[in-house]
Image (spheres, rainbow, N blue to C red):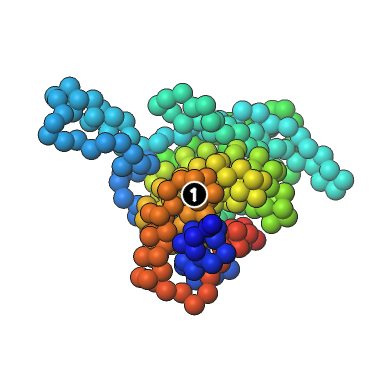
Amino acid sequence: MASPKHPESPGWTGPIAKCTAGTKQEASAAGRDLPCPGPEGHLDAHGGPSPNSSMTTGELQEYWRKEKRCWRRVKLLFEVASARIEERKVSKFVMYQIVVIQTGSFDSNKAVLERRYSDFEMLQKSLLKTFREEIEDIVFPKKHLMGNFTEEMISERKLAFQEYLSLLYAIRCVRRSREFIDFFTRPELREAFGCLRGGQYGRALDILVRVVPLQEKLTAHCPVMLVPALCAMLVCHRDLERPAEAFAAGERALQCLQAREGHRYYAPLLDAMLRLAYALGKDFVSLQEKLQESQLRKPSPWGFTLKELTVREYLY
């Protein structure tokens, strides 16, 4: 017989995940440049064993070599690889294919996305509002009244946009900005979360699997910005009855949160994870204890489940 102490038991009276999230999406998930522990690009400072007195000299040297590799900043290269002309009933425009590659090692998750001139123009305008002085020397490709669809103009624009993105990325405050990150990820994330709201979990996952690796590279300075997308993956896998995959996505999200108990996703995520752990036969007691401690420290009169929280993301 199931015990009331178990999260799936009818009589279970454990704490239900609560949070005081507002409906303004992403407001507290990450700011413009959140100060995260560790140097830029460090994703997991505690992923391996720590040095101790029982290590040999060779083992210590190998340990610090691995640490140095971990603390190395993620560097990205941008290539505008191709372009195509798209015609619709009332408009005609050029779509530029952007390839984003991480340097320093073989990148099996290189990102490929498409943006049009108006997307680049919107990025430039939004950056000028906050970083006018920082980007004043960066030349933005001008729009022409005629000749925008000639092969010569398209080739020229490809090179210009490639240089433009590289120069922006070279400026630390710009590459960490919400505006820069959104340019590469927001359209796809909006589509994915829209599919999630519509119950199209498979389609949502297809998009998230492509965009999350790129988002991870762009937000290496502050992994907490990945949490909404990872939680969306958890919800999709769970509702598709893939508990193991859902649990794996949740583990990544918890790692990104870095025990930020005040984060609006912390309690709902713990609640979802302990239920998954129980269903999978994993140890859920530690998760339950963390959730109870969180609610004791910061009680909340009402709250959202993880799914209720994720569907509020990327509404606009």
Which of the 4 quarters of the picture holds residue 34? Answer: bottom left
Is residue 53 visible in this depiction of the protein? yes
Q: Closer to the camera, 148 or 81? A: 81
Which one is in front, 118 or 239? Answer: 239
Q: Is residue 170 left or right of residue 188?
A: left
Residue at (54% x, 67% y) in the render? 11
Q: Position of residue 146 (x, y in %)?
A: 75, 40
Q: Amino acid at mark 1?
A: Ala
Residue 167 locus on image (x, y percent): 46, 39
Name, please, the residue furthest toward the front: 1
Residue under the point 63% across and 37% down:
113
Image point 23% across, 25% down: which residue?
Answer: 62
User: Which residue is the extreme one toward the bottom?
Assistant: 301
Tell me residue 153's x, y (percent): 68, 32
Q: What residue is shown with label 1?
A: 277
Dot 1 crowding, Cα within 10 Å, few <14, some 14–19, many 20+ = some
Q: At 75% from the left edge and 41% from the top edge, which residue is drawn?
A: 93
* Rendered position, 104 above or below 17: above
Picture quarter with the C terminus = bottom right
Q: Between residues 226 and 234, which one lies in front from this camera angle?
A: 234
